[in-house]
Image (cartoon, helix red, strand yellow):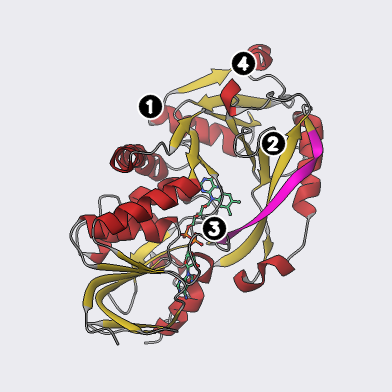
Amino acid sequence: MSSQIYDCIVIGAGIQGSCTAYYLAKNNKKTLLLEQFVLPHSRGSSHGQTRIIRKAYEQDFYVRMMEECYTLWAELEREADVKLYRRTGLLLLGPENGRGFPIVKDTLQRNKVPIVVLKREEFSQHIPNFNLSSGDGALVDTTAGVLYADKALVAIRRLFKSHGGVIKDGEKVIGITPGPVVTVTTASGAYQAKKLVITAGPWANTLLSHTGLELPLQVTKLNVCYWQEKVPGSYDIRNRFPCFVQVESLESEHHIYGLPSNEYPGLMKVCYHIGKDTDPDGRDRQTNQDDIEILKRYITRCMPGLVPVPAVVESCLYTITPDTDFVLDRHPTYSNIVIGAGFSGHGFKFGPVIGKILYELSTEQVPSHDLAPFKISRFQAHSKSAL
Ligand SMILES: Cc1cc2nc3c(=O)[nH]c(=O)nc-3n(C[C@H](O)[C@H](O)[C@H](O)COP(=O)(O)OP(=O)(O)OC[C@H]3O[C@@H](n4cnc5c(N)ncnc54)[C@H](O)[C@@H]3O)c2cc1C
């Protein structure tokens, strides 16, 4: 056992754990970040080159968190001296008389987020190579864009270390002994800290089982699909093609989303927001491709400039709560254990604000956002505490 007692140990070096560890170290807390795999890795939820950042949400609380988060991303870019965000705008499409589109539009307008509402007759002039479905409205969240995810992880972990933080990768946590000083055991040793933050992504419940808690989390595998442009450049970020989210299409009631061609030249990323249940350690044994069939039909109908067969398919995991809102809370039994979990396929963009909130919770500060939507008690019926 190491003789040092850390102020805080963070388990899991995905975007949420890395950001939390960064804010702890930046605020002079002796922090150890433990990661089961050798970094970088592609087995969790935070890998890959790009993610969408947007304020287009149904709920005011997410818009408010994103207001601060854009500032935090810009601060990180400055401190790391690396570009992590590229503004592209986000095209939101959906039935004008449907459920999702009018709510997001109202929320954006109420929160005075700059948007452009596109009329049907001017749509193709602004967004070439895209067919607007009959009955669909279209608007652009002009604040939105692409985050360079892998670069962000590298930069944040580098900043963490520059503030004195310690990363131990390739060290899987196999035991947690709660107490005023928490002991965390890995295959290579044991570490102690006054506070513990668990940000273990798809493995959250495996870690929480050591503390007698189980959250209602569903782990699913997403097929991350890239589609070839028929005419090179037609969906390219350099030609200012936007990100998009389609809600309630003919093909599915669930979201379909896309990012312009960027990381793989000539290939646009278009994905379906729903995956199939999987064991995070057996991800590659989950081979269901129903989502790809939905995407093929959508692309054939709405994006005729793409070849409707994916050129590249990668894998990623979602960890979903029943209401798709996050878990940001203290452990119900052990108040010096803080949990960040259930980011439900939309957590990357919030990384810095979540890191700041988990840092605040673990240092007993008043959190800078209302955490009522993120409390574990909302699952009361499901959770089973040891005590
Ligand atoms: C295909 C796809 C597209 C997405 N698109 C977007 C998007 O456009 N915009 C957006 O905002 N979000 C998006 N997301 C969601 C976002 O990427 C996730 O919400 C976010 O990455 C979750 O981060 P995390 O840190 O909670 O989890 P992870 O990244 O999974 O990190 C958890 C870490 O904990 C480690 N760990 C687990 N158990 C242990 C252990 N026992 N010991 C040590 N370490 C352990 C894991 O190895 C892992 O590194 C997308 C996700 C996917 C999969």
Q: Secondary structure at mark 1?
A: loop
Q: Earlier in the sequence, mark 1 or mark 2?
A: 1
Q: What is the C-alpha distance between the residues marked 1 and 4?
A: 22 Å
Please name whichever residue, 94 or 42, is drawn nearer the observer in this view of the structure: 42
Q: Which of label 1 and label 2 is nearer to you? A: 2
Residue tagged by mark 3?
45
Q: Earlier in the sequence, mark 2 or mark 3?
A: 3
Residue tagged by mark 1?
112
Image quarter where the N terminus lies is: bottom left
- Mark 1 Cα within 10 Å, few/some/many (few <14, many 20+)? few
**Which residue is depicted at the point 35% across and 53% down?**
158
Res 341 seen here:
yes
What type is the residue that disc 4 sits on? Answer: His
- Give how far across and how far down residue 172 sits, in percent: 46, 77
Residue tagged by mark 2?
267
> Measured along the vertical axis of the image, is residue 373 above or below residue 124?
below
Quadrant hosting residue 143: top left
Q: Earlier in the sequence, mark 3 or mark 4?
A: 3
Q: Secondary structure at mark 4?
A: helix
What type is the residue that disc 2 sits on? Answer: Leu
- Mark 4 Cα within 10 Å, few/some/many (few <14, many 20+)? few
Residue tagged by mark 4?
126
Q: Which residues are magenta?
A: 307-319
Q: Which of label 4 and label 2 is nearer to you? A: 2
Quadrant hosting residue 61: top left
Number of marks in the rendered image = 4
Q: What is the C-alpha distance between the residues marked 1 and 2?
A: 34 Å
